[in-house]
Amino acid sequence: DVFHVPSREGDRIMGVAGLGDLLVLLTLDDLWLFDTVSLRPLQVAAGCVAPRSAVKAGNRVVYLGDHALYGFDGAGLTRYDARGELSRTWDLIAWQSVETDAFAVVDQASREYRLFLPIRGEIRDAGATLVVVLNVDTGNLCKDAAAAPWDDSDWHSVSPKPFQNGSGV
């Protein structure tokens, strides 16, 4: 069988992730669920802006949306950063290169989703990468910086630091 994903002008498929017996299809604008019988859209309007950020973490698919980090558990969508902890952090990101440069990994031992983001301007020129860490069990966010060029085999050496009083970076 072939399924057609209707899309709006400029929308495109950004990622696919398995979640139990569901397949979560992430587009730039929306989320879709495929359950071997049908393909149906979710009415969430929280698409994915970085294909390699979409990763199964615990019992949800976590991904980077437009200035937000989201988790979908098959039933509902969670927007992390509800208290605005990342508001100043988003200002550091080189959004024009997120689609190609951002990526995420999950550390199963620590139950952490680690999102590596390109930084803009002088900070990027100094060779840094921003790392946002989400504890999959608690939903708590932390951040860190890592030296670039980034060696994918060394991602586990990042030591995240908690946000201070919700102030961001």
Image: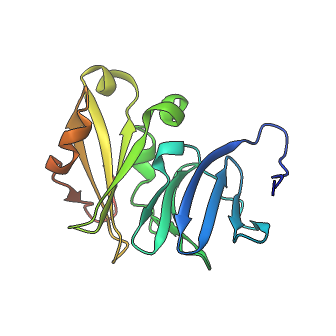
Seen at 35% across and 71% down, the residue is 136
Which percent across, then down, holds residue 15?
59, 49
In this rendered view, identify the residue nearer to me: 91 or 94: 94
- Please state which of residues 42 and 2 is positioned toward the viewer in this rendering: 2
Viewer-side residue, 38 vs 143 = 38
In the displayed structure, 67 sits above or below 110; it is above
Q: Position of residue 159 (x, y in %)?
A: 15, 53
Picture quadrant of residue 18: bottom right
Q: How is the image coloured?
A: rainbow
Count numbered badges in the picture: 0
User: Is residue 51 positioned above or below 34 on the image?
Assistant: above
Residue shown at the point (44%, 68%) measured from the top left: 83
Q: Residue at x 84, y 52 (%)?
A: 4
Q: Is residue 128 above or below residue 6?
A: above
Can you give x and y, in whole percent of width and height, for residue 153 in the image?
Answer: 21, 40
| Left or right placement of residue 118 versus residue 108 in this view | right
Quadrant of the rendered image containing residue 42? bottom right
Where on the picture, by quarter, is residue 75? bottom right
Q: Is residue 50 left or right of residue 118?
A: right
Left or right of 49: which side holds 54?
left
| Outermost residue toward the front in this view | 1
Left or right side of 126 for 9:
right
In which quadrant of the rendered image does the N terminus lie? bottom right
